[in-house]
Structure formats: C-alpha cells, structure tokens
Image: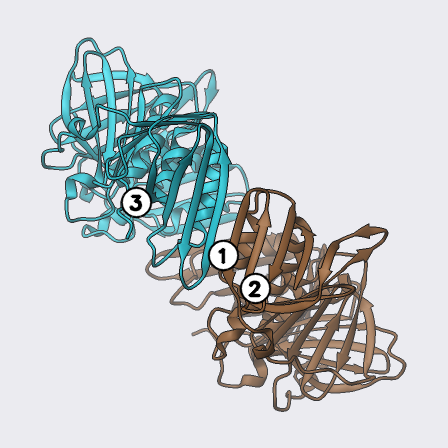
Chain colours: A brown, B cyan
Amino acid sequence: MKFTIQQSTLMSSVQDVMKAISSRTATPILTGMKIEAKENGIVLTGSDSDISIESYIPAESDDNVNVENIEPGSIVLHARYFPEIIRKLPENNVEFEADENFRVTIRSGKAEFNLNGQNAEEYPQLPIVHTDNSFEMPIALLKQMIKQTSFAVSAMETRPILTGVNISLKDNILNFTATDSHRLASKEIPVEADGLAFSNVVIPGKSINELNKTLDDSEDTVEIYVTNNQILFKTRHLNFLSRLLDGNYPETSRLIPNQVKTVIYAKTKDLISTIDRASLLAREERNNVVKLSTSGQQTLEISSNSPEIGNVTEELTVTAIEGEELKISFSSKYVLDALKAIDVEDVKIDFTGAMRPFIIRPTNEEKILQLILPVRTY
Amino acid sequence: MKFTIQQSTLMSSVQDVMKAISSRTATPILTGMKIEAKENGIVLTGSDSDISIESYIPAESDDNVNVENIEPGSIVLHARYFPEIIRKLPENNVEFEADENFRVTIRSGKAEFNLNGQNAEEYPQLPIVHTDNSFEMPIALLKQMIKQTSFAVSAMETRPILTGVNISLKDNILNFTATDSHRLASKEIPVEADGLAFSNVVIPGKSINELNKTLDDSEDTVEIYVTNNQILFKTRHLNFLSRLLDGNYPETSRLIPNQVKTVIYAKTKDLISTIDRASLLAREERNNVVKLSTSGQQTLEISSNSPEIGNVTEELTVTAIEGEELKISFSSKYVLDALKAIDVEDVKIDFTGAMRPFIIRPTNEEKILQLILPVRTY
C-alpha cells in the first residue's frame, strides 16, 4: 500500500473523520482510523459504532491531481498520534507507505515516521445502507434546522427517546422536533421528496451535533437515506452514518395550545439582553427563574429575586402587547436558548395564561416554533 | 455612599481587581470586592491574602471627568455577581449607591439591581508597605523577564522555595531566576536603582503570573517596593501586592558549567518544529524524551522511539556545530519551553557532554540563560 498526497488535503479529511472517533470504546480497533488506498482515491474511516464517518479523497478532481503513485491496500492507524503527525509535517508533500507487517512509513521533507499499524481486515464493516428512501436538501438548510432544534433534546437518560431529534417527512414537508418535556423546539421546511414519508426516525442528539460540525458551510446539497435503524447523510466527499434511537417518539402536536390569551411582539435582541440581565441573580438555587409581567400596551417588567444576593427589575418597551394582562415565571435559560435559536429580529410570543405553555415564533413565520412550559412560583 | 461612573471605566478596573479574588478562601469576606468612594476617586480592592490588587479610578484625569456625584463611603460586594452585572449593564451611565444597611443599588438605563453588601470595616486592612527600597523599570521589560523565567518554577510543593521566582538586585543589575531542579531559567537587565541591593526575594510563581496578566502592555513604568515579606508593584492606577516565600533560595550559579565541549548554532524556529515533531511519539510513558546526535559540521539527527507506537527520525541542517561529537537525550518539553521563552531568531547551545547540563542562549546575548539537565537513556 502506498500513495503520495498533499498535507493540507489529507489533514482536512483526517479532521472530518476524527469527529467520529472516540478514545473510549468497547472495540479497541475503533480507537484507530482506517486508511484505504484504491485505484481512484483514498478513503478514511472513523467510527464509534454510533456514528461512522467516511471521507473520500478522489485521485483527481476538477483537473487537480490530489493523490499520486497509488498502490492499493489498507491499514488502521491509532488516531491518538496520526492526526498530530500529519498536522505537524514539515512539508506539504507526504509519502505514505504500509508493508505486509502493518508497518507504516510517513515521509515529509527530512522527517520520517515509522508507526505500528493494525490489520484493516479487523476493522468492522460499516453497515451498508440499502434503500431507495432518499431525498436531497441544501446543506445550509439542514444545518439551520439542526441549530434551531437540537439544543432542546433531553440531557437525561430517564426517557432515552427524548435524547434524540425526531425527524419526519410527509407530503413533502420535513419536520425536526426536539423536546426535553419542559420545552420543545420544532421546525419544518418543504423538500422535494417524491411522496416519500416516514415519522418515527429519531437521531441521537450527539450524532446530529457532530453532523452539524462535520458539514461545511457550503452551497452543496446533502442526500439523506433513511432505513429502520440507520440514517446516512451523503455529501460529495463524505458519508456520515448514524444509528437511530429505538422506541416511539411521543406525539407532540397535542402540547401546542390552540388558543391565545396574551400576545407580545418584541425585538429579539432587547428581550435577550433584558432577560439575560435578570437571570444574573437567578443562576443557581432559583433554577434560573425570571418573572415577566405586562403593564399596559407596550411595557414589560422583567425581574428576579434571590433573597440572599438581591433583586433586579427592568422595564422593557416592546412593539405591542395584545390581550389579557399577564404575570408569568419561566426558566430564563429555556427562553434565552429559544430566542437565540430563532435568530430573527422580531418575535411574537403567544401566552395562554400563567400556567400554560407559551410559544415563541418569528413574527412573520409559522415554520419554526419554540414552546416553553412556565414555572410555578411560590 | 454614592457615585456616577461610566460602565467601561468601572469594568476595566473590576477586571484587574478580580485577578486577586478567589472563590476558595478561608476568609469569607475575601470572596468579595471592596469598593471605596473618596472625594478624589474610587478605589476597588481584591485579595486572596497572597495577592492583593488595588485599582484607583481618579475622579478627574487628563481633563476627563471619570467619576461624578461622589458621596464618600465604602462597601463590600460579592465578586461572584458584581462583575457580570457591571459587564451586562444596558447603558454606559452607571449610578452606584449604598445605604447604611449595606444595601447597594446599581442603576443603568431602565435596569435596577438591588444587592446585599457587607460592611467594609470587616474587610482586612492591606499591609502598608513602609520602605524606601524601591526602584523603577518599564512595564514591558518586567513582563518580558517574567515570561522568560516564570515557566521554570517548580510545580511540586516538596521544596516550596522553588515554586517561586528569585529576584535579586546588585550593582544596578536586576536578576530573575527560576528552577525546578531539572532546568533553570535566568535573565538579567541593568536598572537604575541607586545602589539598592537585595538577594533572597522569592515571589510565588502564581503571584508573578497574575502580575504579568494584570499589567498592561503599555509604555509606562512600574515602581517596585521590596520589604522582608512583601513586594509591591505600583503603576499609575494599580497597586499589586504579593507576599514573598519564606526560606533561602539555593545558590544556583555553581550549576552553570564553566567549560564547553560542543556548541550548536541553529535557527530557533527550525529547532522548535523538529523537536516538536520528534516529541509527538514521546509524549507519555517515555517522559517526552528526545535524542539528539551531531553528524559533521552542520547536521543534527533528532529522533525518538516508543516501542509500542513507532519511531521518528529527522535530520536538521543547522548554522554550525563546533567541538566534539555529541549524543544526548533530553526532555523535549523543557527544551521547547526554553526555546520559546528565549524568543530570538538564532540560538547557541553549549554542551559539556551527554550527562552534564547544557545551556541555551541567544547567539548574541549573555543576559538570558536557559539551563537544562539531560536525561539518562537506557
């Protein structure tokens, strides 16, 4: 096995694949990275058995030669040392060679590394995704959907299904939903999916966050393949495969109130900074609880109180307040997470009373929804 | 007590003083920050009893009004909340007020914080430094001396005196020395000190690093006052006071070899990157040990070997090698620390044989010296 490659090209693939490799794994060979040289390019593979990432470096692309002097073969190298070695090589030209005893030689400039590799045949085969259940969407849009929902997954293992993001597709509408049972984030977008439909697909929160970090901010699209227990995200040079969570995702639509008693229209930035200030004194024992009360048509009073430390009160002039007067308490963390995820200038908050969930949405959009349960205050 | 101040002015002083405040302290009131309003300005004080920092905001400076509406008084506020509150205030104008019950009100824009303060009379008096033993030096030069020596202090409490930097002054030459008994860093510079002399002044490593972080990169000078058990660094707006370590600092000059068998002249950057690469495989069990051997007049071979992981060898062309052939092993961490601290383009390394300490210096300067003990390899 042998090839010659540019350090920068190899490094960028190594970094992608590293995102799937964990130093804590029950299968020792998975602490390594599989490197395969094929006639038409190099494939790097990393996996922690939940997530697997394959990165492909074609020998030639767009009239560029990326890999030369290929002699096919494969090897596994310990991921603890290999990426640092590649990163610190003295010159851009890298010669990579492995012999039949799994000894690897990496040469660059006057530096020569000899590393003990492992037999690639011992590396587990990745599941092969056989399905026609696929659709395509822009990478940028997928990343946005992840950012706007994945923060709301549960961090508790008491209901494992809630530690994932639920993905469903119906009538060419793709929906992402996450909830930890105190709050819920949901976003939907139209896709071209030729009538493909699925509902109980739940991607582990960790997988979807790694996916978000792995995908470039490019204008490319990603193909998504769904099976019973796996989901594959396929871009030009990358396969990102994740297992799905077992179990039934709860029906969440019934949580969404269908009547509204008070509506607040406000500038997102003003709300964020006022709630953030009020939360400064509410950080610990009081569970980040902040109080909000309306006063007239345009004024909110946002406050918090911690008997030992002190209290804070701030008036905020908002765009408009409609409906009944309101006094409500909530977790400032949940509301700040939601406002930051929505990421628009103007928001609308629908309340159905002090003890009912409220909904934060962009003023002019119904496709994203952040639902939050209030806190009972004593 | 009362004053009005700009948020940015107050924040920068708060940040300086925070460097002395620790949340773990045997004296609870020291988790707080003392705020004093005087006729002519505001003084903030923080202390962890090893280090104390006072920051002074004059009411007026250079025709600017910094503090207005002063009603003298003082209060102590918990440092866990106060800095975050100041940092996040909505407007630049800040009104600060404390009543006789130690209730503090901070107003900015439409936000009002009410905080429970503590009686400033319970805050310990800082030791007053009564001495004429003072000299002055540029801040930039003091910071450079700290950076070039303080990394070499011992992290072990087995010989507490070695956890500090030894400062001595004699014949208008100021010397900083630090050693952990495996390596030694020393730097001296001329100062105007009117014949002032001292030798056994040892500043705790932690204090001197905090001092380095607290001092601005300005063109100002710092006045240094030395007593038996305290050292005071005084700049225009800041007093930084540290206790000194008890005990006798060892005589280090006898460690420095007075003969030389091999001299290597090299580019610092090349040495750093080659040794750094060789150390990649030597990180753990082998204690960062890297081997160096000379070959002819201009070639070094730098290598390391870790039976389980592999080995690395690199040839480096250097400016010149004079004297005997040499094979030596050393801690790559110590050599890299020393080369980075020296911070010049060209270095000279004097060796007195494989088992004797070697000395790294800038090629054209004798005022800084990095001494390192080699490692016996088997």
Q: Work out whether residue A147 or residue B301 is closer to the camera in this orientation and state it.
A: B301
Residue B21: give its label.
3
Q: Amino acid at mark 2?
A: Ser
- Residue B194 visible (yes or no): yes
Mark 1 lies on residue: A278
Q: Which image quadrant for residue A268?
A: bottom right
Identify the subunit bearing mark 3. B
Where is residue B267 drawn, in percent x and y? 48, 28
Name of the residue lying farthest toward the bottom:
A248
- Residue B71 visible (yes or no): no
Note whether B165 is above or below B283 in the view shown: above
Name of the residue lying farthest toward the top:
B194
Q: Work out whether residue A99 or residue B22 is closer to the camera in this orientation and state it.
A: A99
Q: Amino acid at mark 3?
A: Ile
Note whether A377 is above or below B224 in the view shown: below
Q: Which image quadrant for residue A77?
A: bottom right
Identify the subunit bearing mark 1. A
Where is residue B284 drawn, in percent x and y? 37, 57
Question: How far apart in space, not on screen, are marks 2 and 3 (Cα)?
Answer: 37 Å
Camera-nearest label, 1 or 3: 3
Residue A293: give its label.
2
Residue A234 appears left or right of B303:
right
Give the residue drawn at x 58%, y 50%: A107
Identify the subunit bearing mark 2. A
Give the residue drawn at x 15%, y 49%: B158
Element carrying mark 3: loop
Q: Work out whether residue A178 or residue B84 is closer to the camera in this orientation and state it.
A: A178
Have a look at marks 1 and 3 and say if they share a chain.
Answer: no
Question: How far apart in space, not on screen, are marks 1 and 3 (Cα)?
Answer: 24 Å
